């Protein structure tokens, strides 16, 4: 790799001075000098690290210099240790031909690049089978290195071993490819390097490149298979240092280059691409070195808690609408994006060069002479005929990607290079060009996998030039634990999901959306709305409102009609409405449905909003979508669609209850008499609120629980992807918060709760519970632990508050975020209840503490709905006072708000709450 020249090397470590100090100790203490020698070496290592840390803080972006400095420091220590061992510990005046030893740096150390706590990878090379002297020297050197606290990856091989093992193992071959002479017998090292090239490398180029690319693909899958994951691995992640190393390895193996600069000479990179390579490498090395220095260990993952600190050390500052850490991470992802582009162009160019040699390497058959419009097809890839092709008509920059999508072709590296170079040609006249906008809209709403072509458009930099508002969110992360990808990647993934739903690929997962999407009046409205729904993120203000303003400006330019433009703007403005209603509100409360319908107003809007909501949630990241969310959205859609279609409720309350009872009776079959016996104890609100299958379960449980003071049941509930916990007990104040505490102690998270009281005073409480990762608790041991914990909590056999406070936060990295708790009271959302919404940092037993605060405020909780957005939890309670009325007194609301905020912020056990 291309390493910078280190200034004032002796300030890092002075090998001559260190060697003389060691010689002085040996002269004074003889065989007993080892402890003193180790201390001298430790002091030199610590001083060298301190000097490099000082330099990095003074020049916080000088990553290559820091990496080279670390390698230089280790080089000098290895040399001093070697000289001390062969001179003072195991001297040999007349060595035999076999008593020769060369020390090679391999792997990253071999490139001359090391982070402060990187492994020291060393190969000891001998001419043939190791002699006793060689073994003694190697062992002594390793013990010195270990005593310094260095993590050493080492091997001892003869020349024949080197060749044999490198042939058979890709990892060894890669490490040896970067082998660098450090010290010892230079002639022996040179012979090993020559034999490696002649006997290992020659003739295996195809195999090596194919293996490295497969290795890279597997690594990407382990790291999330995207360069836009919000806690990236600087070294191993997609678009990170290892991808740059892979390019260098391939260039070195195939073309014998000795530095990245030589990749230009052999035609694999242009001068501009080489400069971009160096800038990205320098930046990533700086980030990696800062990570190691902050943590004091080999930490390569840029986690949330470290992102702020690295951003501060690298002197990123806040800007309007963007924090310093968001600006730092955007720059990080822009570099990762550039690495992805370099990788694609590099590999395609390599393919092309081998194809020219008629080797057929990494390529299929060549297609000659074929043309698609003004474009050409070369080697099965879409290309352009001249270097001035885009300058002659910049609209072709959009047409290139549309044609590739329509024909199902990859884009030739030559065309991608020119597109990236000429993206600057897209100016205001091009953006206003009707042909260009029609082509862009065709690409965006293509029925042939628009996701891939849009990602290419983004990689080339054309997307952000043609839609500058989109350019503002390219590589922009959202600093929270909920969103997994940058804004541009999230939007492109959402478009891909929408296309898959439309094509029927996800019909089993999204039957409602798969049906509704084919009934929308304008499919291009939906695709444009998905593109624009987050386009105003990172600006001051509500991104939904600001995004709607962007839509009103952009849609006419794209060629949408006024009616379509207004619908897109509404969808962008309200793209969170459906999820907020489904996940935060009680769907059994008819006012929830009627308020939602009053906002939606038409079935066309409802269909469009359903599809937008689903792809928005799914594109957030893996694990965010689940069957519980699908069920809630489906319930809301069905109820709203019925009201919109009929213009009124299909049935009155009495009719709905009667219909529900008939349906439950059918489920109970021969036990249908329970509807008229046990079921008579439950009021109409219960029959309206609960699904038929849960009511059937509850009635059987209530029948079994006659004359029993407490019954706790827990079963896997597949319809919501959760565990259904039912508690039957004599109703009394504080019952809800104690049940919640028991569930938390058993390791459960409550995602939904419905609280009912029968006419005979029996509480019938249903909870949906998942583990912290969003999975049901369905193992026998988990179920038993859950039931016992609830029973213990209700019987007052455990001290809930201190035990809950002692539980560690499952995801401690949430501490990296500032979440200011907020309480909102809404007396208009329900005709019967006051709805209280509390937003706070998610942590163990939050629901329990909030429920206790409501209990102490003399309120009755009728239902609770819990939603998590990464580090932030939003808990909604439907409550009344003890007399069943809403809470409307201003003074009481103020007192209640204070109590709830204290509970949301509570971090220790308050005095007097030992129960």
Image: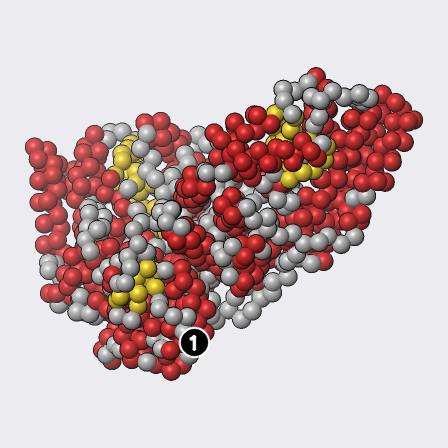
Report helix, strand or loop for mark 1: helix
Q: Nearer the viewer, residue 612 or 316?
A: 316
Total number of numbered labels? 1
Crowd around label 1: few <14 · some 14–19 · many ≥20 (10 Å): some
Q: Residue furthest front?
A: 357
Residue 761 coordinates in the image, percent (x, y): 26, 41
Q: Residue furthest right?
A: 28
Q: Nearer the viewer, residue 785 or 190?
A: 190
Q: How is the image coloured?
A: secondary structure
Residue 896, image quadrant: bottom left
Determine the residue positioned at 70% across, 17% down: 132
Residue 547, image quadrant: bottom left
Residue 867 coordinates in the image, percent (x, y): 37, 51
Q: Nearer the viewer, residue 689 or 456?
A: 456
- The residue under label 1 is 425
Determine the residue positioned at 65% across, 52% down: 3
Q: Visible in this render: residue 885?
A: no
Residue 740 left/right relative to 692: right
Determine the residue positioned at 30% across, 40% down: 722
Residue 551 left/right relative to 87: left
Q: Visible in this render: residue 342?
A: yes
């Amino acid at each position: 790799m291309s390493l910078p020249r280190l200034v004032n090397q002796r300030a890092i470590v002075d090998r001559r001075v260190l060697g003389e100090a060691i010689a002085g100790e040996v002269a004074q203490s003889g065989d007993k000098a080892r402890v003193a020698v180790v201390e001298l070496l430790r002091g030199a290592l610590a001083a060298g690290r301190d000097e490099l840390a000082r330099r990095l803080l003074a020049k916080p972006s000088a990553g290559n210099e820091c990496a080279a400095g670390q390698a230089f420091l280790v080089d000098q220590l290895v040399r001093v240790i070697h000289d001390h061992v062969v001179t003072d510990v195991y001297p040999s005046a007349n060595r035999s031909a076999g008593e020769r030893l060369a020390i090679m740096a391999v792997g990253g150390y071999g490139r001359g690049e090391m982070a402060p706590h990187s492994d020291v990878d060393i190969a000891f090379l001998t001419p043939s089978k190791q002699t006793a002297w060689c073994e003694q020297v190697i062992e002594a050197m390793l013990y010195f290195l270990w005593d310094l606290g260095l993590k050493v990856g080492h091997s001892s091989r003869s020349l024949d071993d080197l060749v044999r093992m490198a042939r058979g193992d890709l990892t060894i071959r890669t490490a040896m490819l970067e082998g660098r002479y450090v010290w010892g017998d230079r002639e022996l090292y040179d012979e090993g390097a020559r034999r490696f090239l002649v006997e290992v490398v020659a003739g295996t180029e195809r195999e090596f490149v194919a293996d490295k690319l497969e290795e890279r693909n597997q690594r990407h899958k382990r790291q999330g298979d995207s360069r836009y994951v919000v806690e990236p691995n600087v070294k191993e992640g997609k678009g990170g240092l290892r991808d740059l190393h892979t390019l260098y390895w391939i260039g070195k193996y195939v073309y014998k280059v000795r530095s990245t600069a030589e990749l230009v000479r052999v035609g694999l990179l242009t001068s501009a691409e080489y400069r971009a390579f160096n800038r990205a490498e320098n930046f990533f090395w700086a980030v990696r070195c800062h990570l190691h220095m902050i943590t004091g260990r080999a930490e390569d993952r840029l986690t949330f808690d470290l992102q702020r600190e690295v951003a501060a050390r690298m002197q990123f500052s806040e800007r309007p609408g963007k924090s310093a850490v968001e600006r730092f991470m955007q720059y990080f992802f822009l570099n990762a994006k550039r690495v992805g582009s370099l990788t694609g162009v590099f590999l395609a160019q390599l393919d092309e060069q081998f194809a020219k040699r008629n080797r057929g390497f990494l390529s299929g058959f060549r297609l000659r002479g074929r043309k698609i419009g003004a474009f050409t097809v070369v080697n099965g890839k879409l290309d352009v005929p001249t270097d001035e092709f885009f300058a002659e008509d910049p609209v072709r920059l959009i047409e290139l990607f549309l044609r590739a999508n329509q024909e199902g072709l990859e884009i030739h590296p030559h065309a991608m290079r020119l597109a990236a170079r000429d993206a600057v040609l897209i100016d205001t006249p091009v953006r206003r060009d009707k042909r260009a906008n029609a082509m862009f809209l065709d690409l965006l709403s293509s029925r042939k996998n628009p996701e891939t072509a849009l990602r290419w458009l983004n990689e080339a930099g054309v997307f952000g030039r043609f839609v500058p508002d989109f350019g503002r969110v390219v590589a922009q992360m959202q600093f929270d634990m909920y969103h997994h990808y940058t804004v541009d990647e999230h939007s492109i993934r959402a478009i891909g999901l929408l296309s898959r739903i439309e094509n029927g690929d996800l019909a089993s997962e999204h039957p409602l959306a798969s049906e509704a999407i084919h009934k929308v009046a304008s499919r291009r409205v939906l695709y444009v709305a998905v593109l624009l729904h987050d386009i105003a993120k990172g600006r001051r203000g509500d991104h939904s409102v600001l995004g709607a303003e962007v839509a009103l400006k952009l849609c006419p330019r794209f060629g949408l009609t006024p009616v379509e433009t207004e619908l897109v703007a509404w969808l962008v403005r309200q793209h969170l409405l459906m999820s907020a209603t489904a996940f935060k509100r009680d769907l059994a409360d008819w006012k929830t449905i009627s308020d939602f319908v009053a906002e939606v107003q038409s079935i066309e809007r409802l269909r469009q909003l359903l599809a937008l909501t689903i792809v928005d949630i799914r594109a957030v990241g893996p694990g965010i979508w689940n069957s519980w969310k699908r069920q809630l959205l489906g319930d809301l859609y069905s109820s709203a669609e019925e009201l919109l279609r009929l213009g009124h409720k299909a049935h009155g309350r009495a009719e709905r209850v009667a219909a529900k009872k008939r349906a439950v009776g059918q489920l109970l079959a021969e036990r249908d008499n329970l509807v008229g016996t046990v079921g008579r104890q439950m009021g109409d609100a219960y029959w309206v609120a609960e699904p038929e299958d849960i009511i059937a379960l509850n009635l059987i449980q209530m029948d079994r629980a006659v004359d029993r003071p407490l019954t706790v049941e827990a079963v896997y509930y597949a319809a919501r992807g959760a565990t259904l916990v039912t508690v039957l007990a004599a109703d009394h104040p504080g019952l809800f918060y104690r049940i919640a505490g028991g569930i938390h102690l058993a390791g459960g998270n409550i995602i939904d709760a419905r609280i009912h009281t029968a006419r005979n005073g029996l509480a019938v409480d249903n909870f949906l519970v998942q583990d912290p990762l969003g999975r049901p608790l369905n193992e026998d041991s988990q179920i038993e632990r859950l039931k016992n914990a609830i029973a213990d909590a209700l019987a007052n056999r455990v001290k809930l508050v201190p035990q809950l406070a002692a539980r560690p936060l499952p995801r401690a990295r949430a501490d990296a975020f500032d979440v200011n708790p907020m309480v909102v009271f809404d007396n208009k959302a329900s005709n019967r209840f006051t709805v209280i919404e509390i937003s706070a940092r998610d942590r163990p037993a939050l629901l329990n503490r909030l429920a206790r605060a409501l209990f102490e405020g003399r309120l009755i909780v009728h239902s609770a709905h819990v939603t998590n957005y990464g580090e932030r939890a939003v808990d909604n309670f439907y409550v009344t006072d003890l007399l069943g009325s809403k809470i409307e007194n201003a003074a009481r609301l103020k007192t209640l708000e204070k109590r709830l905020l204290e509970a949301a912020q509570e971090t220790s056990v308050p005095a007097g709450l030992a129960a």
